[in-house]
Image (cartoon, rainbow, N blue to C red):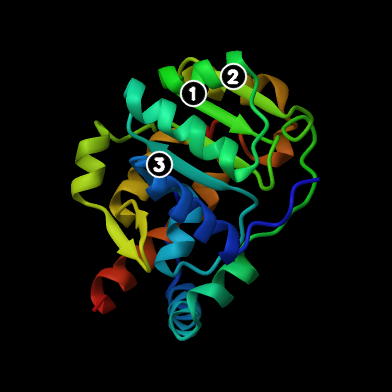
């Protein structure tokens, strides 16, 4: 289960949401999309999976755990 | 390496997909960002309606956008394979035909939100799909995304 945020966090997030709402979409997108190399994941130009379960299993088996694509326990 | 995804690329998807009549929705974090969620991501995620006609239209649109697809790959997309990762084009794109946590495309389409002409999944659907995926990175990001959903519902005009 995801944790419950603290009140201080909620206030900080609200301030971030407010600030974002004042930026035009074009600007929001400029800051939102980054590109860094992700090992394994970015090493093939095409991958396909017959089911999301198959994809999740591949992520758990093949990707470094620090990427965060594995199952939450 | 692919270009960084920017507004111009989002516009290209919107315009080229519209021209080819592709039925799709932005989903995942890229969808949330279009709705105003301040965060970072690396690729765009599109939820496509699974039908032969829509898959074929998507292939034509992707090729026009500059994605280099072989015939077997085009065939898989046309048939609506559940999840496809594309790293062979001008930007990174994930295609999903059966996202976790969402029953049907029609359900999500009825609840969609239009942002400057971009069709986006409702934040509840984005959250549902992330909850169902149950990945480590989702567990860490979901509390903030839920707080955004509450803010968005309270302030949307």
Q: CA distance from mark 3 to mark 1?
A: 15 Å
Compared with residue B26, is residue B96 higher up or lower down, i.e. above or below?
A: above
Q: Closer to the camera: disc 3 or disc 2?
A: 3
Q: Please report the residue visible at 23 percent of the width from the left and 79 percent of the height from the top.
A: B157
Q: Give yes or no for contact between labels 1 and 2 (Cβ–Cβ under 8 Å).
A: yes
State which quadrant residue B128 falls in: top left
Are the residues under marks 3 and 2 on the same chain? yes
Q: Which element type, helix, strand or loop, lies under badge 1?
A: helix
Q: Please report the residue visible at 33 percent of the width from the left and 40 percent of the height from the top.
A: B23
Q: Which element type, helix, strand or loop, lies under badge 3?
A: helix
Compared with residue B41, is residue A46 higher up or lower down, i.e. above or below?
A: above
Q: Counting other residues with Cα less than 10 Å from the Cα at mark 2, is it few (<14), some (14-19), or many (20 or more)?
A: some
Name the spot of residue B118 as percent of width and height, x first.
Answer: 39, 59
Which disc is residue B73 wearing? Answer: 2
Are the residues under marks 1 and 2 on the same chain? yes
Q: Earlier in the sequence, mark 3 or mark 2?
A: 3
Q: Nearer the viewer, residue B117 or A43?
A: B117
Residue that mark 3 sits on: B20
Q: Please report the residue visible at 71 percent of the width from the left and 22 percent of the height from the top.
A: A62
Q: Earlier in the sequence, mark 3 or mark 1?
A: 3
Q: Chain of mark 1?
A: B
Q: Counting other residues with Cα less than 10 Å from the Cα at mark 3, is it few (<14), some (14-19), or many (20 or more)?
A: some
Compared with residue B32, is residue B36 higher up or lower down, i.e. above or below?
A: below
Q: Which element type, helix, strand or loop, lies under badge 2?
A: helix
Q: Please report the residue visible at 54 percent of the width from the left and 24 percent of the height from the top.
A: A56
Q: Closer to the camera: disc 3 or disc 1?
A: 3
On screen, residue A49 versus residue B69, left or right, reads: left
Q: CA distance from mark 3 to mark 2?
A: 19 Å
State which quadrant residue B102 falls in: top left
Which disc is residue B77 wearing? Answer: 1
Q: Chain of mark 3?
A: B
Name the spot of residue B150 as percent of width and height, x first.
Answer: 30, 67
């Amino acid at each position: 289960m995801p944790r419950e945020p603290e009140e201080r966090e909620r206030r900080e997030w609200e301030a971030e949401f407010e600030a974002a709402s004042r930026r035009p979409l074009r600007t929001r997108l400029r800051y939102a999309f980054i590109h860094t190399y992700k090992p394994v994941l970015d090493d093939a130009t095409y991958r396909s999976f017959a089911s999301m379960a198959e994809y999740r299993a591949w992520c758990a088996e093949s990707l470094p755990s620090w990427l965060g694509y594995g199952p939450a326990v | 390496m692919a270009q960084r995804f920017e507004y111009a690329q989002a516009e290209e998807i919107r315009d080229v997909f519209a021209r080819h009549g592709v039925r799709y929705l932005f989903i995942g974090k890229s969808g949330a960002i279009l709705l105003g969620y301040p965060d970072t991501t690396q690729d765009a995620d599109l939820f496509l309606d699974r039908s032969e006609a829509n898959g074929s239209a998507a292939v034509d649109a992707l090729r026009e956008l500059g994605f280099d697809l072989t015939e077997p790959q085009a065939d898989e997309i046309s048939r609506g394979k559940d999840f496809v990762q594309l790293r062979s084009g001008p930007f990174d794109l994930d295609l999903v035909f059966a996202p976790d946590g969402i029953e049907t495309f029609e359900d999500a389409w009825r609840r969609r939100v239009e942002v400057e002409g971009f069709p986006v999944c409702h934040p509840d659907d984005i959250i549902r799909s992330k909850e169902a995926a149950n990945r480590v990175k989702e567990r860490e990001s979901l509390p903030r995304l839920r707080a955004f959903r509450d803010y968005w519902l309270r302030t949307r005009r």
